[in-house]
Amino acid sequence: MAIIGFLILFPLVSAAALLCIRHNLARRVVVCVSAAAIVAASIALVAAYFGYAAAFEFSSVAIDYVCTGLSVVITACIVYYGIRYRNVWAVMLALVQFVAVIVLEYLFAHDIHEKIGIYLDPLTLVMALIIGIVGSGICVYALGYMDDFQAQHSGQKDRRPVFFALMFLFLSAMFCVVFSNNLLWLFTAWEVTTVCSFLLIGYTKTEEAMKNAFRQIIMNLLGGLAFVAALFFIVVNCKTLSFAVFLQMGVSRPDLVVLPVTCLAFAGLTKAAQMPFHTWLLGAMVAPTPTSALLHSSTMVKAGVFLLIKLAPIFYCSASSASILAAIPSLMVILVGGVTFAFCSALAISQSNAKRVLAYSTVANLGLITACAGVGTPEAVWAAIFLVLFHAVAKSLLFLCVGTAEHHIGSRDIEDMDLLFERMPRLARFMMLGIMCMFIAPFGMLIAKWATLVSFVDTHQVALIILLAFGSAATFMFWAKWLGKLAGVAGLPPNQEEGTHRSEWVSIGLMAMLALGCCVTLPLISSYVVEPYLHYLFGGIALRGEAFTAGISSSNLWIASLAAAIIFIVLFAGLGTTKARKVDVYLAGVSVDNSGRTFRDSLSAERTATARNWYMEGVFGEEMIAPIGTICSALVIIIAFAVSAISLPGLI
Amino acid sequence: MSFATKSPWVIHYDASSCNGCDIEVLAALCPGFDVERFGIINTGNPKHADIFLVTGSVNEQNIHTIKEIYNQMLEPKVVIACGVCACSAGVFHDCYNVIGGVDQAIPVDVYAPGCAVRPEAIIDAVVEALGILDKKAKALAAKKKGA
Amino acid sequence: MGMNIIYIILGTLAFAICAPVLGCLLAGVDRKISARMQGRVGPVLLQPYYDVRKLLGKENASVNATEGVYVTCALVFTLLAGGIFVSGGNLLMSVFVVALSALFFIMAAYSTRSPYAEIGAARETLQVMAYEPMVLFMAVGVYMALGSFNVATLTWAAAPIITDTWAIFVGFLFVLTIKLRKSPFDLSYSHHAHQELVKGITTEMSGSTLAKVEVMHWCENILFLGWVAMFFVWSNPLSWVLAIAVALAVYFLEIWIDNNFARVKWQLLLKSAWIVAIVLGGVNIAVLAYW
C-alpha cells in the first residue's frame, strides 16, 4: 500500500522539483535518481505482491476534492489554450465535460462513498512494471535527447523544465489509472493523461504541433465525455463508484450494462487511437521523440487498452448472454480492433518516415490488443497481456533508436538509414533486435499473435481470422524491408555513433535487455504471472466450465525462447569478420566505387545505382485505403451506439 | 574426376565481337545441343560461374570489364577464348583501339579458333577446359587441406 | 513437456539427414522432367548433388562477412521447421519458423547492398506477403478440421482432412507455386535463364553460401510437399501411400505449370494470391466455423 502511494506521489514530487530546476546538472541528477527510485519501487511492488490480488480500504474526502480541483485545472488549461489558439471545439468539449463532471460529483455521486479506493492484481502489476521501468527509462533517455534537441533549436526558449515535469506527471497519472478502483479517481487520472499528452505534443508550439495537439485533445475529450456518460449510468443504475463492483455486475448480467460498457469501450478506443481516431497518434509524432516513445509504449495508449482488457470478462460473458444486445459492445470492440489492425498494417507499407511507420504499427498492434480484449476468452486475454508487454518494450526500444539515429544522421527517413549497420553498428543492431521483436517468430510479439489466432479460431471469429491473416502479411512486408535497409554492409563508411549521450545508451540498453529478457522468460511470465491472473479473473466465472489452458503448449514456448536467445547471440556476436576473400558486388559494368555502387556504363558515363525500398503507394497509399478503414470503423461505432441506446430500458 | 567437372556453369561475355561467335555460343547453350546433359548451365552471373566464355577482341574500353568479371569469379575457374578475335584479335588486330586477344587482359586456358567458332568447337573447348578445371580444383582442395 | 522438446530435436536431426537426400533427388527429377517437356534429354538424376558438391569445393570468398551467417541461420531454421513438422509438432509453429527462415534469406540478400540482390530481396518480401495469408488459412483450416495444430493428431483421425478443407487445399496449391519458386511466380529468383535480374536474390551468393541456399530449397520443397501430403493422411496406414502419391502428383503439376507459363508482374502476383486466399480460404473457414 505504501509503495503504491509512493509510486503515485513520488513522480509528482519529482515533477514539481523539475519544474523549478533550471540547471542542467541538477536536472540530470534529479531525473536519474527519481527514475531509479521509481524502477526500484515498481520492482519492490511486484516482489511484495507477486502472484495475488489485493484490494485496499482507502478513501478520503480530501482526494475527492483534489479530483474536483484537478478537473478545474484541466478545464482551465484546455480553455486557456483553446482561446489562445482559437479552437472552439476544444473549449466547448472541455466546458461540457466540466459541467457534466461537477453535476455528477455533487448531485448524483455525493452520497456514494467507495471504501475500496485502491486495488492490485497481476495485470496491474504488469502495467506498473511497464510504466515504472519503461516509462522511467524513457525519462532518462530524454536527458541526452533534449540536450541535443535544445542545441538544434537554439533559437527557442528553453522549456525543458516543463517538459520533464510533464513526463513525470504523466507517469504519476498512469500509476493512478492502473491502481484506482474508485471510478472518479480513475477518470480524473484518465483526463490528466489526456492533458499531459496535449501539452507534450504541442511542446514546440509550432503551428503543426498545435494543430495536432488540438486534434488529440478533441478526440480524447470525446472519449472522456463517453466516460462521463458511463459514470452517470453506473452511479444512477448501479449505485456504486467501484470499478470492481461494476465489473462483477457486468459479468453476472451483461445485458443490463450494455450502454455504459459501450461508452467505456468507446473511451478506451479513442485513447488507444483506434480507427477512426488513429490520426491523433500519427499527429503526435511532431513532438520530440521521447514524447512519442512515452505515448506509444508505456502510457496514454496503454491506458486505453488497459481499460478494454479490464472489460474483457464482460465481453466474454456477453457472448453467452441470453440477450443478443449484450454482445453489442463486444462486437464493436472486436470489429474496430480487427479493422484497425489490418488497415494500419497495410498503411505502414506506404510510409518511409520511420516514426510514421512506428506510429502505424503501434495503432495496428493496439488494434490487435483491442480485438483480443473484445473476444475476452482467457486465451485472448493471455494474448492481449503479452501483446501489451512486448509492444511496450519493443516499441520503446525502437523509438529510442530512431530518435538517436535521427540526431546523428539528420533524418528519420528509412531510406536514409542505408548502411546504418556500419555507420552506427551498435545502434543498428539494437534497432534490428527491436524490429525482430515486433513481428517475427520466435520473439514474444509473434507468440502473442499466435495465441491471438488460436483464440479467434476457437471463438469462430471468421472476420477476425481473415483480418489477422492479411494484417500479419502486411506486417511482414513493412518490417522486413526496413530490416533489410538496416542490414546493408559495404566498405567502411565513417562511424557516426560517437557523441551519443551515455544516458541514451543506458536507456536503449535497458530496453533491449527488457525486450530480450521478456522473450526468453516468456514461459515463466506466462505460468507465474499471466495464468494466475486468468485463474483469478475467470476462475470465479467458470461460465462454460472449462479449465484454462493457454493456446500454446509450454514446450513450444520454450523452443521459441531458446531460438530468440540464439538469434540475439547471432545478431550481437555472430556478425563479425570473415577470413573469406572479399569480392566486389556485381554491377554489370566497371566499378568506379564499388561500395558506393558507382560504375562506368557502356557509354563510359559514370552512374550510381540506387535502390529504394518498395512503398507501393498505388496499392497501400494513405489516400487509397485509409478512408475505407475510417469509414468502416466509424460506421461500426455509430451502429453500436445506436443499438446500445435502444437497449437502455425505458428509453423508447 | 572432381565435382567441379560435373557441373561447369558458364558465363558468356561479348567483348567486341561482331556477334557471329555470340550467336554460336548461344546456339551451343540452347536446347538443340542440350549441354545441360553435362551439367552445363549458362548463369550470366560471374559469382556463380566456373567457365568464362569470351568472344571478340579486347579493347581499351572493355579490358576493365573483362578483368572485373574475372576477378568476381571464384576459384577454380577457367577462361575460354571463343573465336579468332578472342584468340588473337583476328582481322581487328591493328585497329587503333584494339589491344589484342583475351590473353592480353586475363590468363586464358583454352583457345577455340574459328570465324565464327562452330558450336562443336565450343563444346570441344569446354570439354578440354574441364580437364584444366579438374586440375585447378584438386590444387585448391589440396591447398585448403594444407591451410 | 520435456519429451516434446526431445521429439522436436530428434525430428530436426532426422529431417536434416533425410530431407536433403529426398530434396536433392526431387530436384534431379524436376530437371529431368523439365528437360523432357522441352524435348531435351536433360542432366543426370544426381546433377543437383554434383552442383552442390562443386559449390562446396569453391574458393572461400564473399562480398561481406554477414551474408553467410544470415544464410546459415535461414538453413538452420528451415531444418527446425521441418523437424517440428515431421516430429508431429505444431503446424503453426512450423509455418512461423519457415517465415523466420525466409526473413533471414531476405536479410542476407539485403546485406550485400547489390542492386540486383536488393531488387530480388524486395520481390521476395512481396512474395512472402502474397502467400502468407493463404498459408495461415491453411494452418487454421487444418486446426478446425482436426481440432488441433499438432500434426501427430492426423494419425488417429477418422477421415482425411481434405474432405473438409478441399477449397483451402486448392488455394494452398496456388500459393505453393510461389513458395516453390516456380514460374509464373518466380519473381525473386529463378532456375530458368531469366536474365533481367542476373540471379535475383542469390546474385551475390557464391560458393558454399550458394550451396547452403540450394540445400535449403531442397529441404523447403520436401517440407511443403509434406504439408500437401498432410491433407490425405488419416488413421489408415495405407493412407501414407496415397498421401505420397498425391504429393508427387502435385509436384508434377507444379513442374508442368513452371514450363508452361511466363513470369507475371508483381501486381498480378499479389492480387491473385490475395483474392485466392480470401475466396477459397475465407469461405472454407467460414463453412468450417458455422456449419
Image: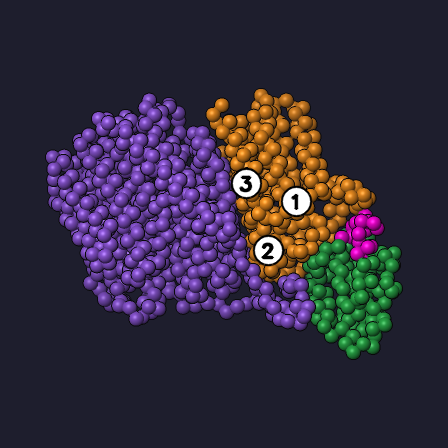
Chain colours: A purple, B green, C orange
Tell me whether circle 3 and circle 1 mark residues in contact (CB < 8 Å): no
Q: Position of residue B136 (x, y in %)?
A: 78, 61
Which amino acid does the dot numbered 2 rest on? Ile
In the displayed structure image, the side of residue A416 where residue C162 appears, left or right: right
Specify which label sits upstream in the sequence, 2 or 1: 2
Question: Alpha-carbon distance for marks 3 and 2?
Answer: 22 Å
Q: Which mark is residue A228?
A: none
Can residue C183 be found in the magenta stretch? no
Question: In the image shown, does A624 or C136 lie closer to the viewer?
Answer: A624
Can residue B36 be found in the magenta stretch? yes
| Residue at image coords 19%, 41% | A184
Tell me whether circle 3 and circle 2 mark residues in contact (CB < 8 Å): no
Relative to residue A402, is residue A156 depicted above or below?
below
Q: Position of residue C151 (x, y in %)?
A: 56, 31
The residue where tag 2 is placed is C119
Question: Dot 2 falls on which chain?
Answer: C
Which amino acid does the dot numbered 3 rest on? Trp
Question: Dot 3 falls on which chain?
Answer: C
In the displayed structure image, the side of residue B2 where residue A601 appears, left or right: left
Crowding at mark 1 (Cα within 10 Å: few <14, some 14-19, many 20+): some
Magenta residues (range): B25-41
| Residue at image coords 40%, 65% | A407
Question: Alpha-carbon distance for marks 2 and 1?
Answer: 17 Å
Q: Which mark is residue C184?
A: 1
Marks 3/2 same chain: yes
Element carrying mark 1: loop
Nearest-to-viewer mark from 3 and 2 = 3
